[in-house]
């Protein structure tokens, strides 16, 4: 049984954190609204950087968006999702 998970990034090159909407409640910072693969070109807004199909050798960034409007964009060689085992009662 798992109680959560961690994303582990290998070969981390860059992390960009964009600001939140100040009018949103702080609780919205912990609610993920989307996780997307995006084209690395930061000159365009994220909505125009998504693709329906990706080739195995195409570079991309991982974009994590929160309900508060905050977003985190990550450029890394690879990512691993690691489950956190629940503590036994």
Image (tube, rainbow, N blue to C red):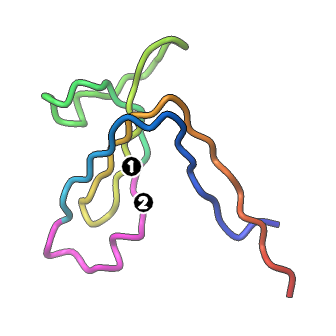
Q: Which residue is rendered at x = 17% and y = 35% of the image?
A: 45
When the figure is inspected, residue 30 is found, relative to residue 33, above or below; the finding is below
Mark 1 Cα shell of 10 Å, populated few (<14), some (14-19), many (≥20):
some
**Residue 49 placement (x, y as % from top left):** 27, 27
Q: Which residue is rendered at x = 52% and y = 42% of the image?
A: 9
Please tell me which residue lies in front, 5 or 47: 5
**Residue 20 placement (x, y as % from top left):** 20, 64
The Cα atoms of the two marked residues, 2 and 1, are separated by: 7 Å
Tell me which segment is drawn in magenta: 21-34
Query: Do residues under tags 2 and 1 come within 8 Å of each other at their CB atoms?
Result: yes
Q: Which residue is mark 2?
A: 32
Q: Decide whether residue 33 is among the magenta residues.
A: yes
Give the numbered dot on residue 64. 1
When the figure is inspected, residue 48 is found, relative to residue 65, above or below; the finding is above
Quarter of the figure with the C terminus: bottom right
Please tell me which residue lies in front, 53 or 84: 84
Please tell me which residue lies in front, 34 or 78: 78
The quarter of the picture where residue 68 lies is: bottom left
Please tell me which residue lies in front, 37 or 17: 17
The quarter of the picture where residue 38 lies is: top left
Q: Secondary structure at mark 2?
A: strand
């Amino acid at each position: 049984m798992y109680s959560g998970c961690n994303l582990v990034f290998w070969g981390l090159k860059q992390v960009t954190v964009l600001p939140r909407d100040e009018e949103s409640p702080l609780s919205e910072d912990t609610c993920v609204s989307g996780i997307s693969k995006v084209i690395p070109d930061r000159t365009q807004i994220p909505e125009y950087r998504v693709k329906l199909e990706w080739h195995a050798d195409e570079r991309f960034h991982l974009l994590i968006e929160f309900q508060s409007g905050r977003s985190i964009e990550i450029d890394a060689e690879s990512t691993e999702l690691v489950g956190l085992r629940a503590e036994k009662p």
